[in-house]
Structure formats: structure tokens, C-alpha cells
Image (cartoon, rainbow, N blue to C red):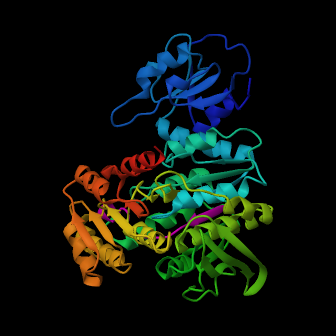
Amino acid sequence: MNKMFSLDEVVAAVSGSVINRKGNMGGTIFVSSVSNDTRTIEEGNLYIALKGESFDGHNFVGMAVDKGACAVVVDRASVVPEGAIGIVVKDTLVALGDLARHYRFKLGCKVVGITGSVGKTTTREMIRTALEPSFKVVSTQKNLNNEIGMPLTILGAPRGTEVLVLEMGMRGRGQIDYLTRIACPDIACITNVGYSHIGILGSREEIRAAKTEIINGLTDYGVLLVSGDDSFLFDYVRNIIPLNNGLAAISVNGKLEGNVTNCPLCISATNIEENDGMSFDVTVAINGEEKLRNRNKISLGGEHNVRNACFALLCADLLGADLEKAQQAISAYTPMEGRGKTYHGKKYTIINDAYNASPESMKAAFGNLDITNPGSRKICVVGGMLELGDESAKLHEETGCSCGNYKFDIVIVTGDDQDSFIKGLNSKNQNSQVIKCKDTEEVRAKAIDIIKAGDTVLFKASHSFGFEKLAKEFIANDEN
């Protein structure tokens, strides 16, 4: 059996007290794995009873014991059944985080933490891809980036893990702070600060404050990586980074803004060419002195993906990875479904970028559509952006302006703020054919009628619009 923890070790890590209703424990008890789901419990597992808005894991403690849990972590002694061992804590969610933090240091691995308004999942995946040829890497899966998913990711890492790559999501202030103090990253990445969650937080300044909480958990001599092209973020973190931490800037096309005196490490991408993806030179400089320069290529389009690749390459360099292997791995990287993955079919090309949407990711998606398949008819299928609060109409109009700058042939649009989007589009370009739709089903009907062989089509909207399914339907039809 895998001996992940001893029972005494767990008790100390979570500051709990033992309730023994088993009698003679028969020597040291070892935990083989940790679970909060009775469906996955196996002999020797530790079960942590978590509470949510619509569930309470304490109702399943008996089932966990029956399936072989060696102990259960609960918030009250009364739920510990006869024949079981309980560890009672004040808050089981906090206990999960405390145990994950303990295990993070027990592993003795390096940790990379990633947050940002947009691009954090693609950046996470590029970092993982760049590091895997050199290290044993465990990373966040899917969107398990919250106060439950991230600790479980850490606790699911096997012995021998050398690098943890952890995405940190948030819905409000204090949440990144909580996650980073569990993960204690050696390298922290903030991809950008945009307008996602402005409906909750109220301003970009509050969003920036929430994202930069990731600094609070940095280990001594840990390094923060940010976009040097985003002066709103870069100039801010230069003034708050602790003295025992480093700061690194990433710049694309020489756009580094602001005074970089307090930022000794810079990585820049220049000589960018669009050719079935993006080719670019990467230069790493320390205190203004060039350390290395290499030519790189990625299969994804758009300068935003060049920046994401630079985050990955700098992480690889800082961790001592084989850079040649890292570059080769990144060049072969393809995005996850719904995150800008491009399908080149027999009839048409589909860009499925419909997992989510914000003003920043919309603008990046338009740029990607513009450079894909030059000369083809370009169709932009756009839904709304959510969680923008009182700024929604204004931001939809600004996003429409961005769309209008590219002069796409046809724009199919839906969502509550579609009129604002169209107003912005028409202010820049009145030549595109604009088709308004009341809902996703009408978008589907119009798209089926309009999209023809040879077209290049972007599907982009917030997740609730269901455009991912729509994009996959067109891909499936092309394959038949």
C-alpha cells in the first residue's frame, strides 16, 4: 500500500483531534490517498467530508467507512460511526487546504502558479507541455482551479513529482490569496488583468488587486512573471513585489512599457511572422544583457499565444529544463477544445473558441480569425460576454469596434447586448453583413444556411451560450 501519510501526520497538519471508535488501532495507520467523493473511495483512503450549497459530505461518512476509508475528516464528532476513526476539525475545507500545503512541501517539488483574467488555461497547458520533456509534471486538469480542485490536484500528485503546475481561479477578493498560501508557488504567473468579473468586483483596479494576491504565497526568492506590455499591471507589481522575490517581464514585439529598472529579467518576442501559426525570436535578458536568443514556432495564431508561449519558455528556463526539448514540445502543442482550437476540414475551417469570453479574449479571437486562411471568406459568430455588470453595454460596444477593425465578411451576433456590439462594429465598418439573432438556436439556423465550403468561421461566446456544441456540430458535419 502507498504510505502517503501517517494518521498522526494528518492530525498535526490539519490541527485536528482524533475520535477513536474502532478500539485497538493495531499500530500506525497509514493513509494511501485522499478523497472527498465516496464514489472513488478505496481501501486505506482518507475521506474528507466537505460541505457545499447543495450537498454535505457528512451524510456519506458511513458509506466511506464501509468502502474502506481508514479515517474520516469531519467537523463534528457525532457523525463518526462505530468502528471508525474520525479527525475532527473546525472546517473541513480549510483542513483540505492545510493537508495539501503540507503535502506540497513533503513532495519537495517546484510549484508554478498561474492566474489572470484570460489565457491562464492555455498558459498553464503550454507550461506543462514545455516542462514535461525534462520533469515529472502534475498539472491542474480541466477547470479544477478553485478551493477544492486545486488542493485535490496537489494531493493527487504521486511521489516523485518534480513540478506542480497549478491554475488559480477566483470569483472575488481573497480567493487567490487563499489558494496561493496553500500552493506556495516558486514561480507565479499573471497573464493579464482585464474585465472578467468586473460585475462582481466593480473595477479593473479591484480585479488587479485580486489577481496580484498570488504574490502573497510566493516562496522566498520566488519569481513573479507578468506581461511587461500591460503597464496597468506591470507598473503596479513593480511597486509591491517583496524584496525577497524577483520580477520578470514578458514582452511581445518590443512593446515593453514603463520603467524596467526594478525588473532585471526580461523575455521578449520579436520578428514575429504569421505562417500556419506564429514564428518568432525569443530573447532572454538579465539586467539588459542578452542571455540567449532562439527562433521558435507555435501552431496557434495570434500575438496573445506568442505571449503565452513566452511564459512557458521562461518558466522552463528558470526551472533548468532542457530548452531545446521545451521549444520542440511547444511547437507541437495544440489547444484544448473550445479554447481557440482550429479545425481545418474538407469544406471549411472552424475556430472553436467558445469555452468562455471576455473583451480581451474576444479581441484576441478576432485577430486570430483575421490571420487564418488569408483570402477565404471570414464569418464571425459571436455571443454575449457575461459577468460585466454595469459596464456590459460599454464593453460590448468596444468589443464591436475591435471586430469592425477587421472587416469580416459576415458577423452573426446574439446576446442581450448585441445592439451595443453592432453599434461599435458599424462605427468602424459598415461593409460587413450583420445578422442579429434572438438566441443560439436562431444562430444555428442562420449559420447552417450561410456557412459554405471554403469559409473560415469563428465561434466565440460565454460558455452558457452553448457555442462549443455548435462548433462541434459543424466539425462533425464536415467529417461526414
Residue 274, compared with residue 124, is above or below; it is below
User: What residue appears at the point 25 percent right and 81 percent down from the top-left corner?
Assistant: 430
Whole-percent x, y for residue 196 in the image: 38, 64
The residue segment tinted magenta is 187-200
User: What residue appears at the point 74 percent right and 62 percent down from the top-left corner?
Assistant: 328
Residue 123, compared with residue 103, is above or below; it is below
* Residue 344 in view, yes or no: yes
Q: Is residue 457 left or right of residue 165?
A: left
User: What residue appears at the point 58 percent right and 89 percent down from the top-left corner?
Assistant: 259
* Residue 185 in view, yes or no: no
Q: Is residue 189 left or right of residue 436?
A: right
User: What residue appears at the point 55 percent right and 59 percent down from the top-left corner?
Assistant: 122
Q: Is residue 348 left or right of residue 320?
A: left
Q: Is 66 or 306 nearer to us in this picture?
A: 306
Magenta stretch: residue 193 in it? yes
Whole-percent x, y for residue 343 in the image: 51, 56
Whole-percent x, y for residue 114 in the image: 57, 60
Q: Is residue 59 left or right of residue 119?
A: left
Q: Is 238 or 149 nearer to us in this picture?
A: 149
Magenta stretch: residue 218 in it? no
Whole-percent x, y for residue 70 in the image: 62, 20
The quarter of the picture where the N terminus appears is top right
Quarter of the image where one finds residue 9: top right
Q: Is 220 or 380 nearer to us in this picture?
A: 380
